[in-house]
Amino acid sequence: MKQSVLRFLADLRFAISILLIIASCSVIGTVIEQDQSIEIYKLNYPLTNRIFGFLSWDIILKFGLDHVYKTWWFLGFIALFGLSLFTCTILQQFPSLKIARRCQFFRTTQQFGLLKLSRNLGNLSLSQLLFRIKKNQYSIFQQKNIVYCYKGLIGRIAPIIVHFSMILILIGAIFGALNGFKAQELIPKTEAFHVQNILSNGQLTRIPKVVSRVNDFWITYTKQATVAQFYSDVSILNTEGNEIVRKTIFVNSPIKYNNIDFYQTDWNVIGLRVQNDTSSILQYPLINLTNAGNKVWVTWIPSDSEFKKGLTILVDNLQGYCSIYDESGIFVGNLELNETFNLNMPITLVDILSSTGLQIKTDPGILLIYTGFLFLMLSTLISYITYSQIWIIQTNRQIFVGGNTTRATFDFEIEFLKLIK
Amino acid sequence: MDWDIIQNLSSNLVFGILLFAMTIYWISLSFFKWTKNLSQVGKISAIVANILLFFILGSRWIVAGYFPLSNLYESLLFLTWTLLTIYLYVEFKTKSKLVGAILIPVALLINGFANLTLSVDMQKSSPLVPALQSNWLMLHVSMMMLSYGTLIMGSLLCILFLVISKYQDIDLQILDESSLPLYNIMLDYYEAKLFSPSDEVSELGKLKLLQSLDNWSYRIIGLGFPFLTIGIIAGGVWANEAWGSYWSWDPKETWALITWIVFATYLHSRITKGWEGKKTAILGGLGFFVIWICYLGVNFLGKGLHSYGWLS
């Protein structure tokens, strides 16, 4: 019973079907937008006028199609696949490797009938033939008049390493999901922070109590006024508030401390500091009105005490200026830092307050995963190598020679025919 | 002269040359006489197109100062170049005109799409956005394109197999009992067809052709698969360095995984007994469409990390 269950799991057709099921389920997640709010699904998939006659938001929510890749059934298929991979490696690949490592001589000439490629030679001496085979980088084993040659055994072993690397990656992913966390913080520059806004964490995770400080945040621009790079100057602090590590991070260059990684991912503008005619500095909050992901912030500076009149101010970059619009919404000019603008009253732009968006995470599985990645890359490449075998029996007058290969049958035919020509 | 104009001109020239090469190949397939020289002409023009594409991409690299795979236009040109290179290699190995006849049209379509439908703005190289400023760009994107090229080639051979076999089940085992000469199989088929119109020989020749198509598609997909693996992994490592997650189920990632699964299935079904020929060819042919969804189709969704910044 146990045996037959394992055999079933290890069966190639079973593994293939699981893989194809995973592939088809993945398609769903690319068609239906993932991780949106219920309102969006209600809007796009109404109960009346169902898509394909059945798909509506209640079905989406019932089967978890709004987060396909985290549903129990999807993870179940992946687990089943991992199990199948493991049993296949143990039950099928290892035994076949054992057979391959054995030196298999053909002892009777009848055995050549089973090969796709075999010939009887009369015109070639055995030593000539072996010399040619040796030149083609075969390993040769000889017992009196019978010979066995092979090359590319590594092409037989590599697929097993492919499977092992994938198991390693799966284990690493599970380990990382159980013990890691991911958090996102928007921190105004010059402020200290610790990890608070946690997006996901595993059952066994302990959130580290690390305190950090964003010393500075700035953006560099290209000549075409597009963003060249985002920079955050980040310090890691100890419990006394003293600096331990300091690094200027940017996209593609995180700071790593004690297995905690800080990534530059987002930014925000939170306020303007403006000096008015009485020389007092006032701070105005900036808000982002568009939710289409456009980075445009707006604020309003009243110019009279009844808050009837004023200026609308727009900021869409961190190049050090803001754009001023009057009451009727007409653009009146750009105001640079430390510049004074005078329409009804003089205002001076003192500072644009920005915050940096950091992603913070630990992933203890990453070492396993990277190891798996490395071996997977190498072993899939090596798997391309074809495993070729040649058998020879010399009788009184004739030489029987035959061979086969695992992958490159076309190339092997040509090689074989050159050998015996 | 401006570099933009030179590149644009050579890109259009490539289109013309490919159109010419395609015509030549199709003519040489339809008429069997003096075809040797004719397909040589096609091959040489494909080489010229290949060199021109290399020149365009190289000059863009030098002028812009970064690896020229930053937008859709450049990636389309790179794909054309990869396809042409692979086809030239395969043709050199198999000596078959068929490969050119089916692959050059695809290259022509891609090149035409890049030159005729994309606006001038989208053809220009623009500064790299922060996320792309990484050395991983080179490894990830070039490996992905290389794998797309190789897999497109391999899956096209699968489709060709289905077309030539007229979707019938073919018993390739018959061949093993036959005694025809084995090498230069594809060419033999045509010569057999040309010189001896008797049915038996040409049927056997057809079988030979199908068998070699079968094996060639297997070998080419077998090569494209590790490239795809390396490309996906490079992307994963890059994503982990850039924003701390090696896999985020972004539509492009998911479709790359689906492509990977389809071809993994193809490669594994080869070692299942009795799955040679038609059944595996169907899987491989399916892969052809999946690659195109992965490469372009996903961008029509217009979301995710991998949008090339078009259609928006």
Image (cartoon, rainbow, N blue to C red):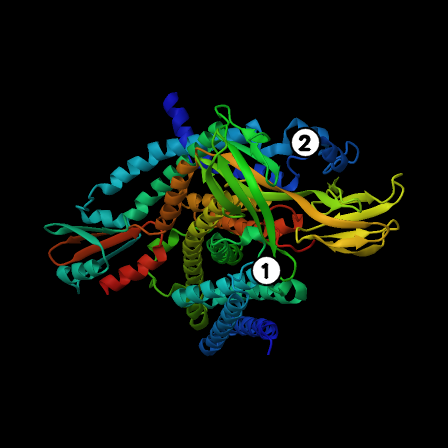
Secondary structure of the residue carrying tag 2 is: helix
Residue occupying image coordinates x 63% and y 62%: A223
Image label count: 2
Dots 2, 1 in contact, CB < 8 A: no
Q: Report which residue position mark 1 lands on.
A: B127
Q: Quadrant of the N terminus of chain A?
A: top left
Residue occupying image coordinates x 72% and y 44%: A272
Tell me residue A391's x, y (percent).
Answer: 21, 51
> Is residue B21 visible from the viewing direction of this image?
yes
Tell me residue A352's x, y (percent).
Answer: 68, 46
Residue sitting nearer the eye, B85 or B221: B85
Q: Is residue B283 left or right of residue B172?
A: right
Residue sitting nearer the eye, B258 or A303: A303
Q: Report which residue position mark 2 lands on.
A: A60
Residue sitting nearer the eye, A283 or B81: A283
Q: Chain of mark 1?
A: B
The type of residue carrying mark 1 is: Pro
Q: Is residue B178 left or right of residue A257?
A: left
Q: Quadrant of the C terminus of chain A?
A: bottom left
